[in-house]
Amino acid sequence: MKTIINRKEIDLNVADLERNLLDWLRESLDLTGAKNGCGIGVCGACTILVEYEPKRACLLKVKDIMNKSILTIEGLTKEDGSLHPLQQAFVDAGAIQCGFCTPAMVLTAHSFLLQTHLPTREQARKAIKGNLCRCTGYQQIIDAIISASVHYQH
Ligand code: FES
Ligand code: FES
């Protein structure tokens, strides 16, 4: 039983299969970018990409990612530690305040930009509607997504 997390193959332990995926990522793999904002599928702060689709880790079990490829925010950063252009766009646009929503917001936007060539602001707004941010007012987040879109080739 295996999964691929951030391009690395991981052997799954049978004892972990029924564990909550978000808890497992944070506690056993030390991947703490995904946050627990509500634990019931409402806020989006726990979003990770499963086969490049945004999923709420708080609603999944470890067995749900068996034989699948997972991306967390830690895997979006380049191997040399430098930021992905989308992460840099969030920094440049001032799209981060407390940062609690940011890893999930960035991953949701990443999935969207992989599928959508040069989106409109309205498309970007719709793409992140399931990710709640209590701080920024969303405008700078949309700015960041639009400005990063030129880095995605289609
Ligand atoms: S912690 Fe998963 S949706 Fe809020
Ligand atoms: S930056 Fe604080 S919740 Fe979004």
Image (cartoon, helix red, strand yellow):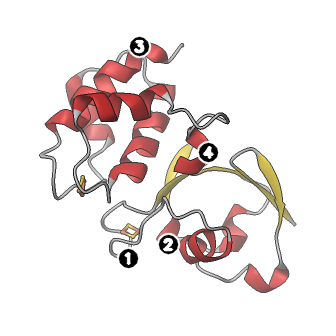
Mark 1 within 8 Å of ligand 1, using the beta carbon: yes
Vertical position of residue 15 compared to residue 149: above or below: below
Q: Which residue is mark 4?
A: 75
Q: Foreground: 54 or 16? A: 16
- Looking at the image, tell me whether mark 2 or mark 3 is earlier in sequence order: 2
Q: How many residues crowd around disc 3 within 10 Å: few (fewer than 14), some, or many (20 or more)?
A: some
From the viewer's perspective, tell me whether residue 72 is left or right of residue 36: right
User: What's the CA distance linking mark 1 and mark 3?
Assistant: 35 Å
- Looking at the image, tell me whether mark 2 or mark 4 is earlier in sequence order: 2
Image x and y of residue 23, in percent: 56, 77
The label number, if any, that marks residue 59 in the structure image: 2
Please report contact status of discs 2 and 3: CB closer than 8 Å, yes or no.
no
User: What's the CA distance linking mark 2 and mark 1?
Assistant: 7 Å
Name the front one of labels 2 and 4.
Answer: 4
> Label 2 amino acid?
Leu
Residue at 26 percent across and 45 percent down: it is: 96
Please report contact status of discs 2 and 1: CB closer than 8 Å, yes or no.
yes
Image x and y of residue 56, in percent: 47, 62
Q: Which residue is mark 3?
A: 150
Which quadrant of the render holds ligand 1? bottom left
Mark 3 lies on a secondary structure that is helix
> Label 3 amino acid?
Val
